[in-house]
Image: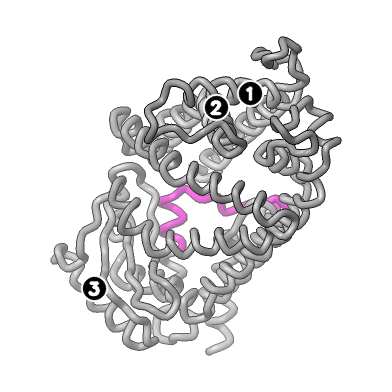
Amino acid sequence: MKSQAYALDKVKFSMIAGVIDQVETWALLSPFVAVYFGSDGAKPASGIASLWHLAIDLCQRWSRLAPAFLNIGTGEIATSLFFVSLLSLTGMITSIPSSLYKTFVLEEKHGFNKQTLGLWITDYIKTTILSAVFGLPLIAAFLWIVRWAGEAFVQYVMMLVMGLVLFMYVGYPYLIAPLFNKFRHLSEFPEYEEVKTRTEALAKRINFPLGRLWVIDGSKRSAHSNAFFFGLPGLTKHIVLYDTLLKQSTAAEVEAVLAHELGHWKLNHTVLLLGSSQIQIGLSLSTFRFFIWNAALFYSFGVPALAGGADKYPLIIGFILAQSLFTPLNSLLSFTSNALSRKLEFQADQFAADLGGDYAKDLKWALVRISAENKATTSCDWLYSAFHHSHPTLPERLGRLSTLTNKKK
């Protein structure tokens, strides 16, 4: 089957990418690639220590040469920003070939890629710039909060994360997404007038605070389809439909898909997932707290203390090392997160089915059509699926919908 071939290719790619990630981690933690020596001339004990020494030197040179309005000093935060930038640059050595292969070989092979090389390069440049513009100030704020609050930093960092999430809810569709895709009003497409009418009627029926209906040109990059809504809790929401979904599905099927999506809103799933993610972040930060102040952790990897503070070490490296140590914990958190997400998907399916009429039947047809168009695998080991899939498999969803339909007969 085409879907199985696509799934197998994705698994192979994921395994190779995983091995590359492990090699990168080994390079950071081992002394064999510590090619940049510190000012004392001693060979660093690890690649991450070598990068930190390089960041110190670059930061000091920048401080001497940069104009006053671009001078960020030579303290821990400034050096950490140089360090993160270096880490990102080294990551590009593998991420660029990996992304090119996935887009122009794997996705191309299975008929999903619609990008040109020029568009891919443009997207990569935009993404890199956005990562720097938003990421570096956030890292600076994070490090400042941790130094300012000490061991009580968890609650303050969680507030920072919550602020970022709320900003993305509002800002992403207006500030970031338009840099990559074109948004047009659904009313501009007369051929989808029935979709517009059905969607507005559905929103009115369940009291969904519908604002605008948008169509996004997802087909410019991929043949995959999707639909979602955005907007802060309690305020007007806007629905976004991928043009690929509109082309692949009937009006009734699009309505059924939206009934499922709006079910997430009606059942407060967005708020629940937001709360769940905050709990996971809080648990991770609370665990990190026991390690980032531990001098032995930094000493083990040859990371030097900060200048002027014999008992103070670079916090950014502490978090990176702690993150490496807690990969098993992250796997457990991912498992619980997927379990919750799968449960909520079943609930949203049930919400759509409970609306009566042909919603259950149309949703089943829509799921089959979307699965076929996206070449989603329909057969998967249950344990693998539990760890890696945030959505139930197609047979699981169809079986549940059939059960709900039979109960109503």
Badge 3 element: helix
Number of marks in picture: 3
Q: Position of residue 308 (x, y in %)?
A: 71, 33
Q: Which portion, as a residue range, is magenta?
A: 367-384
User: Is 22 in the magenta?
Assistant: no
Q: Nearer the viewer, mark 3 or mark 1?
A: 1
Q: Note whether 228 is above or below 109 in the view shown.
A: below
Given the image, on which type of amino acid does mark 2 rest? Leu
Q: Position of residue 149 (x, y in %)?
A: 68, 57
Is any atom of residue 124 visible in this view? no
Q: Note whether 114 is above or below 59 in the view shown.
A: below
Q: Earlier in the sequence, mark 2 or mark 1?
A: 1
As measured in the structure, the alpha-carbon distance from the residue carrying label 3 to the one carrying label 1 is 54 Å
Mark 3 highlights which residue? 196
Q: Earlier in the sequence, mark 2 or mark 3?
A: 2
Q: Position of residue 74 (x, y in %)?
A: 56, 31
Quarter of the image for residue 155 reads: bottom right
User: Is 377 in the magenta?
Assistant: yes
Q: Nearer the viewer, residue 291 or 389?
A: 291
Mark 1 highlights which residue? 51
Mark 2 highlights which residue? 86
